[in-house]
Amino acid sequence: MKIVSTVRRGAHGKGLIQYLAGVPTLLYTKEAIPASVNASYYAGIDIGMDNLVALTSNQPGFVSVLVNGRPVKSVNQYYNKRKAELQSKLGHTGTTKRMERLTNTRNRRIDHYMHTTSRWIIDDLVAHGIGTLVIGKNDGWKQEANMGKRTNQNFVFIPHARFIQMLTYKAELAGITVLLTEESYTSRASFLDRDEMPIYDRKQITKPTFSGKRIERGLYCSKDGILINADCNGSGNIIRKVAPDAFGSEGVEDGKRVVPLVVHPVRLSFPSRSQKTSNGGSERSREHSISL
């Protein structure tokens, strides 16, 4: 199997340069090299803003991960503020070369962060032998966003669809199966109590009830009073959307036992190109992990 990728001219590798929409691009093919992964091990991704990614898995010993999304929000906030200033000075609708440079810089910075994040995630899945990646995505989630003016602006301007594409093609090159699923009620249902999660229906008169609830930002309380990270709760439920028995009493669907979900995740943040670290790699802050 060959995956065809499109990148800007100047990327490494040989290929055919074409002009697409006036932009020189390099088209090249790369052989997919399947890694040694187990399709019965699932990883779930809940995509958000403050936490760009909440990553959990039913693979024994896997430590849940939260990827910081604030760097992307910061780039967007500066871009929106600066563009509004330039637009005001221009005095009419339209654009200038300065505004175009601003937009290009913003796009490159966000692309870099998302490429770095997606590369790390896929490498981590391969290292743990995880063969199925489940990503939560609702149709029209950007168009129907209703979270307040400022939050809407941050959410809509973050290219989540592009991020999912990055994850998908990188996963396919590694032989990992990617499944997209609707994520209705995944943040409200209790992962630890195995609450059922119906598909959202506007016409439904009786609303579903759940065992636990979110008691504050970032914290979810189960029926028995156990506190877990709210985004990891949603990520685990996203896995259950496509594999209801992935965390069952017998563990994964092939019958192997599963270690309980880590409820205090590792937190990662990837520096920009201009930020240097002492070891030349990504600077990662790790928190102590606690399992049930």
Image (cartoon, rainbow, N blue to C red):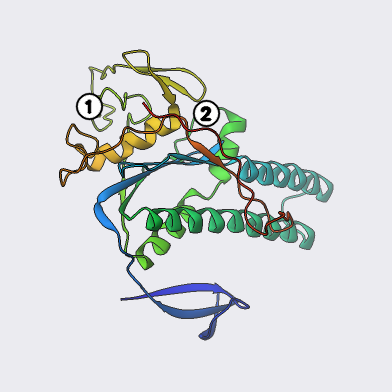
Amino acid residing under circle 1: Glu
Q: Which of marks 1 and 2 is nearer the N terminus?
A: 2
Which residue is found at the position 54% from the left and 72% from the top?
7
Q: What residue sits 84% from the left and 47% below the top?
A: 89
Judge by depth and name the residue closer to the eye, 119 or 161: 119
Which disc, if any, is residue 196?
Answer: 1
What SS does tag 1 mark? loop
Q: Is residue 34 left or right of residue 26?
A: left
**From this viewpoint, is residue 132 visible?**
yes
Residue drawn at x 34%, y 46% as measured from the top left: 43
Residue 147 is marked as 2
Measured as percent of width and height from the top left, residue 239 is found at 30, 40
* Disc 1 to disc 2: CB gap under 8 Å: no
Tell me where residue 184 sits by quadrant. top left
**Tag shown at residue 40:** none
Does residue 269 lie above or below 194 as drawn? below
Residue 71: quadrant of the picture = top right
For label 1, count other residues whose C-alpha is less than 10 Å away and answer few (under 14), some (14-19) or many (20+). Answer: some
Q: Which image quarter is the N terminus in?
A: bottom left
Q: Nearer the viewer, residue 84 or 115?
A: 115
Residue 107, position in %: x, y? 63, 57
* Percent coordinates x, y for residue 105 in the rendering: 70, 58
Say which of marks 1 and 2 sits in front. Answer: 1
At label 2, the amino acid type is: Met
* Residue 68 falls left or right of residue 103: left
Q: Residue at x 26, y 18 (%)?
A: 207
Q: In which quarter of the image is the C terminus?
A: top left
Examine the rendering and report whether any part of residue 49 can be seen: no
